[in-house]
Amino acid sequence: MSRAVGHTAGFSLRATAVSTPRAWPAALGIGLAAFVASAMFAGGGSTTDSLVWIGGGVAVLAAAAGAVSFSGVTRLPCLRRLEAISLALLVAFVAWNGISIVWSVQPDRSWDYFNRGLVHLGFLVAGLFVGAVVPRALARTAAVLAGLVAVTLAWALAGKFIPSLYEDGGRIARLREPVEYWNALALLFVIGLPLALYLVGDARRRPVVRATAVLFTYGLVVGLLLTYSRGGVAVSAVAVALWLLAARNRVVSLVALAVAALPAAAVAVWAFGEPGITRDGAAYATRVRDGAQFAGVFALGGVLVLALAYALARLVRTRGGEPFSLGIRKRAFVAGTGVAAVVTAVLVFVAADPAAWARAQADEFTNPPTLGLTQEPGRLASVSSNNRWTWWQEAWRAFRAEPLIGTGAGSFEVTHRLLRENSLYVLEPHNQALQFLSETGIVGFLLAGSAVAAAAAAVVRSLRRLEGREQAAGIALAVGVGAYLVHSLVDWDWDFVAVSAPAFAITGVLFSAGVQYDVPTRRSVPWLAACVLLLVGVLASLVPPWVADRRVDRAYAELVAGDAANAAALADQATALNPLALEPWLARSDAAVALGDVSDARKALVRAVEVQPLNAEGWHALSVFEDSVAGRPDVALAYARRALELDRFGPAAALVSDLEARAGPG
């Protein structure tokens, strides 16, 4: 393990070891684990509701870690060249997101995206300090994260066993709690797979622990299949392949996968036939009955897996980590290759005309389905992009319109309405690379892509320097981050703190584990002040939009209660806190209408249109106001037509038809 020694502006560093207070590494590690757990269980899906407390909390943790280090109490993370370049590029990308507010077609969403970037940076910086001060940081991080994913898995499956745990569980059957989105939950399970295989292959752990890790793998496969996430299944294959390429005990991992995955697939296939498990809108009684049966079948499969896994774990332990001789491993490799060749030959034979079959699959992927893909298990057999190809084309068209700087971070919702060819509505194009290209232009895309490339090179170099358990744990964690990146090419993972928080925290630990500066010889007041100022800046960005949203909610509650004056005051506060969003101005207009001030109501709506002139929602609200409140249908028609130009499939279409019918010929 190497150690870097150097000088940093404002204070000097020395090579002699200085003892770190025992409680600090534990407190820092527990704090980061607590915030990652909060992100997984209370991240709020893709909403911004949780950013203020999860993001604010991890920002406080990161600032505290910096303050403690710059006070001369404990180690500072050492950023070597590649890690420093990656971090600098990521900071620049997040800053570019914030700068894009100036020209964004949806500036409030750009502010939200800037805040998301700050939260992601907070997790990465906290991970940097954990990697620097916590002994055996990678092994401990892998174990803790595996435990968090296991608890998430248990909670998700518990909703199937006991339907009363989820009030909304009967509406959509796909496994999605506690993350609130099935594809994001599937990604968490994929991140857990290499961690489980790492635990299985660690010969120094007790057989019962390793057998439990195989049982964990079994549960992950069942959970993954019950999300019906095709992207999750595909990325899980990539993650397993990466692990097998990089790990040492490949045969142990393969055997563990077979022991876990085959019963898991059987249990999942059985569950697919039970309406109370997989059918949307199933009666509660059906869900209770089938949930109890599913729990029993899952438990039986788990007992079988645990027994086989325990036998495998004992064999591994007695043979020093490799239960199979070289000859057996070679024969296993030859057999696996042969099976793969046979499966490939069968697929080619079934296809009859491989070229035609490939063209048919490509057509199915690129053409929008006549009907949306079913939310049932049968979707796993489809290769349709489920409209993603269309959204990707929209993102590309938006990029071509604004190639240098983009339309503004997080603004795809507006550009999608401008470009869409059907009534489907989506917030993001479900491809992070195209989204960054569309929203932040070539500048943002290059910053983000270069940050990822530098980070990948840095992690690979670091893993080569590590040994033993730390190296194996680091590989498992790095594969999880790789799965996050690959999955982001078919989804919008940046918006989900439940998956982004662990990915960025892992990256931070990988950056600094194994190499660190020693303790500064004296306190650095300027750097301490910088920590405080950065924290204040982050909170100053996170809090206002969150408070504004709550002021808007309270304003509408006061309108329902009949207190229009208080509603107007609350709406005014919201517009002051977040003047970039439409909702505060719409609430201010509604409050003015309730007070009988038509002129003030119109001014608020005009301001909303000025803030987001390409957003059809503001024009539609202004049209409705002019028609139903101001009594000016001719003016309303002009506004409605503008809204229709900006969104051909929005509510303005019906409004234009109604106003034109009332206006009569000419």
Image (cartoon, grey):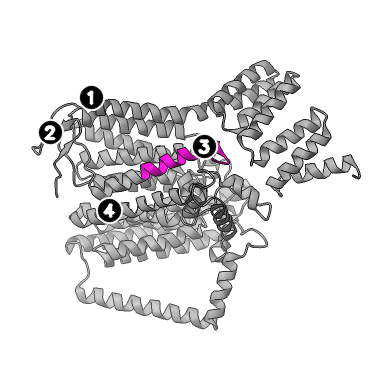
Choose top left, top right, bottom left or bottom right for residue 258.
bottom left
Residue 459 numbered tag: 4
Please state which amino acid type lies under the numbered disc 4.
Val
Please state which amino acid type lies under the numbered disc 2.
Ser
Name the residue nearer the viewer: 551 or 144. 551
Please state which amino acid type lies under the numbered disc 1.
Val
Q: Position of residue 276 (x, y in %)?
A: 58, 53
Mark 1 element type: helix
Q: Mark yes or no: residue 42 visible.
A: no
- State which tag comes first along the sequence, 4 or 2: 2
Task: Please give the range of residues in magenta.
Answer: 90-109
- State which tag comes first along the sequence, 3 or 2: 2
Q: Mark yes or no: residue 632 visible.
A: yes
Q: Position of residue 658 (x, y in %)?
A: 83, 42
Q: Residues within 10 Å of mark 3 (few under 14, many from 20)?
A: few
Q: Is 106 covered by the magenta stretch?
A: yes
In the image, is residue 437 above or below residue 316? above
- State which tag comes first along the sequence, 2 or 1: 2
Q: Position of residue 512 (x, y in %)?
A: 24, 45
**Residue that badge 2 annotates:** 19
Mark in the foreground, 3 or 4:
3
Name the residue nearer the viewer: 549 or 8. 8
Mark 2 element type: loop
Distance between the Cα atoms at labels 2 and 1? 22 Å
Magenta stretch: helix, strand or loop mostly: helix
- Quadrant in the picture for the C terminus: top right
Q: Residues within 10 Å of mark 2 (few under 14, many from 20)?
A: few
- State which tag comes first along the sequence, 3 or 4: 3
Distance between the Cα atoms at labels 3 and 4? 35 Å
Q: Which residue is depicted at the point 23% across and 24% down?
A: 525
**Residue that badge 3 annotates:** 102
Mark 3 element type: helix
